[in-house]
Image (cartoon, rainbow, N blue to C red):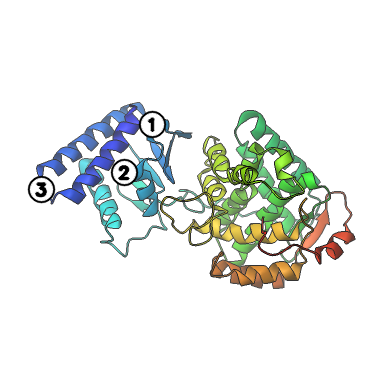
Amino acid sequence: MTSAAAFLNAVGKRLSAMSLYGAGHPSRDQAMDQVLEEMSMLLRENAFPVFNFLDGDVVYENCVMAELRQWEWSLRLAGVGVERLEISPGTSRSDLEAFLEEIHARLNLEDAGASVQEVSGQSSIRFGEVGIEGLSDSDPEPLTTATMEVNLREEAETIGWLHGEVMRTGEVPASEAVAVVKLLSLAMHSERDVVVPLVHLKQVDQYTTTHSINVSMLSMGLAEYLNFASVDVRAIGEAALLHDVGKTKIPLSVLNKPGKLTPDEWKLIQTHTTEGARILLASSGHMELAAIVAYEHHLDWQGEGYPEMTYPRQPHTASRLIQVCDIYDALRTRRPFRPPWPHDRAVEFIRSRSGEAMDPEFVDAFLSMIRQWEPRQIALDGESDPEDETRAEEAVDSSSVP
């Protein structure tokens, strides 16, 4: 067993002992001694160990720990807001005890006021949800605005190349993804008022590329509309851009199938959420938030949907925001199995699912934003397809949301 696995197992045993025995019981003290010993060994190997907990999997050093797959405590920690744990050199016994006491309190609902939205801090232990901006305390310089003609051909080509690299290497080129999001933000701010220049699909096999761009811009627009900090807007844009990266693992014959999927094909499609999370967690460049969104974007705001959660919980804030934008663009885009829906019908569908499948706060904000910022469609080849709108009137039943 690796030192990282031994440390986490010791943490789990200590938390179990805290539930079974009262303060001062020898078993609690022995379990604490074991945690301290295993932590010392871990810190000798890695001065700044970082763990991420994602629905049963433990990610350490950008790799899923095979020896702790479906580890019970990963599910329970994530369920009380501990999706990330950072340990620094010099962590003392009292630091560890304070950390474990707070986790124990959350698990037993003793501390109803404990915030799980912010990263909680001890002197040398940091833990909490993966924030929209990760764990960074710095806000980069805001993007400068410029007057420019909106042309997203290069960005679309870059996303196509990025997906190819994922297929070739199994990792996301993080710097290119960040660069694309910066350029998309500039496109949104190319005029006096914020615009959402949505790419118009011309070919069915462009779907994943154009959809990724559109969801990224819609999500950044919504985050700005809600007055999120610029660093949060950028992080949401990156996560939205990569939310479907797991589809690189799905054969095009299944993704672009014009007819009804077989049960086996539908199961294969559903794997793109877990595959996307694994790809992003294996990539360099602090992709934790993107991995969470990739994993959760087909869960409704109460935690139902796919992938099936062992312990359903409300998805991350970023996942709930991006989900609304994802559904809108999916409905508005022509697919092999149906024409695009007109804007009014897509909006009505989203409104009808508010409070059921989608977070009502983000639905209300999105609908208000759309009324003020009418999305401007642009085509990769500079032309639109007027036939799409007339065919959209024949759209299929609303139950077939992609």
Q: Residue at x 66, y 59 (%)?
A: 401
Mark 1–mark 3 CB contact (< 8 Å): no
Mark 2–mark 1 CB contact (< 8 Å): no
Residue 315 in the image, given as x and y percentages of width and height: 49, 56
* The N terminus - image quarter: top left
User: Mark 2: few, some, or many residues within 10 Å (few <14, many ≥20)?
Assistant: some
Amino acid type, residue under disc 1 in the picture: Glu
Amino acid type, residue under disc 3 in the picture: Gly
Which residue bears the numbered disc 2?
124
Which residue bears the numbered disc 3?
24
Which residue bears the numbered disc 1?
67
What kind of element bears circle 1?
A: helix
The Cα atoms of the two marked residues, 3 and 2, are separated by: 25 Å
Numbered disc in front, either 3 or 2:
3
Residue 209 in the image, given as x and y percentages of width and height: 73, 46
Residue 105 in the image, given as x and y percentages of width and height: 26, 56
What kind of element bears circle 2?
A: loop
Amino acid type, residue under disc 2 in the picture: Ser
Q: Residue at x 77, y 45 (%)?
A: 206
Does residue 43 appear in this view? no
> To which quarter of the image does residue 333 belong?
bottom right
